[in-house]
Amino acid sequence: MKNKTILILGVSSFVGSNLAEFLKMDFKVFGTYYKNRVEIPDVLSFHCDILKSEQVESCIRITRPDFTIYCPGISSISECQDDPTEAQRINANGLYFVTEHCHKYNSTLIYISSSMVFSGEKESYGEIDIPDFTTNLGKTKSSGEYFLETSFVDYLIFRCYQFYGRGMTNNKPNFFWQLERGKEFFCDDTLLMGFLDVNYLGMIISLAIENNLRNLLLHVCSTNILSRYQFANQYAKNFNIDPGFIKKTQIKLPYIEGKTSSPDKKLTFHLDTKNIENYLNILPPTIEESLNFTFKRFNGQSS
C-alpha cells in the first residue's frame, strides 16, 4: 500500500507519533505539529494550526493524502476539565476546516475518539449506544463524532481507551513511561477499562484501509478490562519489574456540572468490538495477550 499517502494531524502526540512509526512501513506518511516539533525517520512533518483554514488547506493540498488521521486534541480528563473551551476547540471544532479540505481533496478522514463519551455506568457499550458522557473529555469527543457523522461523507471513527506504549517524542511522560521508572507511583483502582498496545490501533487502521471501510464507527478495545492499578501490576509481572512501587489510589472524575454517578461504584468503560470482529474478521486480544505482544516487540526490555 506504499502507493497510498497518509497525513497525520498532531503527529507529535503519543498516538500520532506511534501511528506514524507503524504506518510508515506500508504507507507514505506525512505529519503536522503545532507547538512541538517532531523528527520521525522517513516521515516529513511540518507546522500547522488546525484552527486556521489556509494552513490546513496548504497541508492537505501539498501532501494530497488518501487518508487524513485527526490526532490533535486534549486526551487528559483533568486538562479538559481545567480548560473546557480549549478542549472543545481542539477535540471538536478543529474538525471544521479539516473536513472542508478533506472533502475538497478527496481524503478520507479518520477520527480517534474515546470511550469517555460514555458514563461508565453500564457493564459494556456497543457502537449503537447513545453517548451519556459525564466529563468534558467525553463531551468534546462526542461533539467531534456527531459533527463527522452528520456533516461529512467519507470518514472512519475509532473509539478507543486506553493505549499504552513508548512515546516517539519527549513532550511529556506518558503512563507507560511512568511505569518503567521504578519510583513510587499511584494508580487508580476505580475506573475499569481496556488496555491495548498502541500498535494494535495501527494494525486495525491498516486493515480498515485495506478492506475499504467507510462511514463507520468502530470500537477498539481489549476483550477484558482492568483498573490502572491492576494493569500496572500485570505489566510489572510481564516485564519482571518489582511491583512494590505501585500504590493503589482512587480518583473521582471531574464531572460536568449537573452530571454525576453512583457513589463508590466502580465505573466500567468496556467497549464491545462487534464491528471490528464482523468487518475485519479479527478478535481483539486480552490485556495479557497485548502485554505479551509488547514484551516481544520490545525484546523483553522494559525501557
Image (tube, helix red, strand yellow):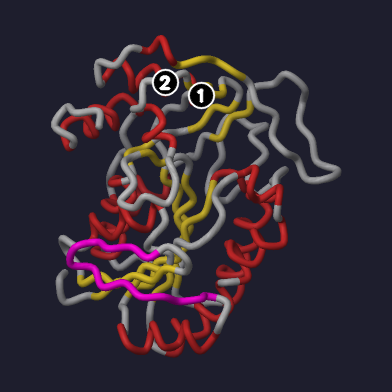
Q: Residue 10 location, x and y as percent?
A: 43, 64
* Towards the viewer: 269 or 293: 293
Q: Percent x, y for residue 280?
A: 30, 52
- Give the CA separation, mark 1 to mark 2: 19 Å
Residue 292, quarter of the rendered image: top left
Check residue 183 in the rendering and tell me which mark sits there, or answer none.
2
At 51% from the left and 78% from the top, the residue drawn is: 99
* Res. 266 image quadrant: top right
- In the image, residue 74 sits, relative to residue 52, either above or below, namely above
- Quarter in which the N terminus is drawn: bottom left
Q: Which mark is residue 68?
A: none
Q: Is residue 178 left or right of residue 140?
A: left
Amino acid, disc 1? Ser
Of the image marks 1 and 2, the number of the one nearer the N terminus: 2
Give the residues in magenta: 37-50
Quarter of the C terminus within the rendering: top left
Where does the image place residue 126, in percent across and percent down from the top left?
A: 54, 44
Q: x%, y% of residue 219?
A: 45, 47
212 sits to left or right of 99: left
Q: Residue at x 47, y 69 (%)?
A: 34
The residue to which callout 1 is attached is 227
Give amino acid for label 2.
Lys
What residue appears at the point 69 percent right and 21 percent down from the top-left corner? 265
Element under label 2? Answer: loop
- Residue 276 against residue 197 in the figure, above or below: below
Density class for disc 1 (Cα within 10 Å; few <14, some 14-19, many ≥20) is: many
Q: How many neighbours does mark 2 have within 10 angstroms: few (below 14), some (14-19), or many (20 or more)?
A: few
What is the chief secondary structure element of the magenta stretch?
A: loop
Check residue 211 for magenta coloring: no
Judge whether residue 171 can be spotted in this image: yes
> Relative to 21, is 279 on the left or the right?
right
Residue at x 45% of width, y 70% of height: 155
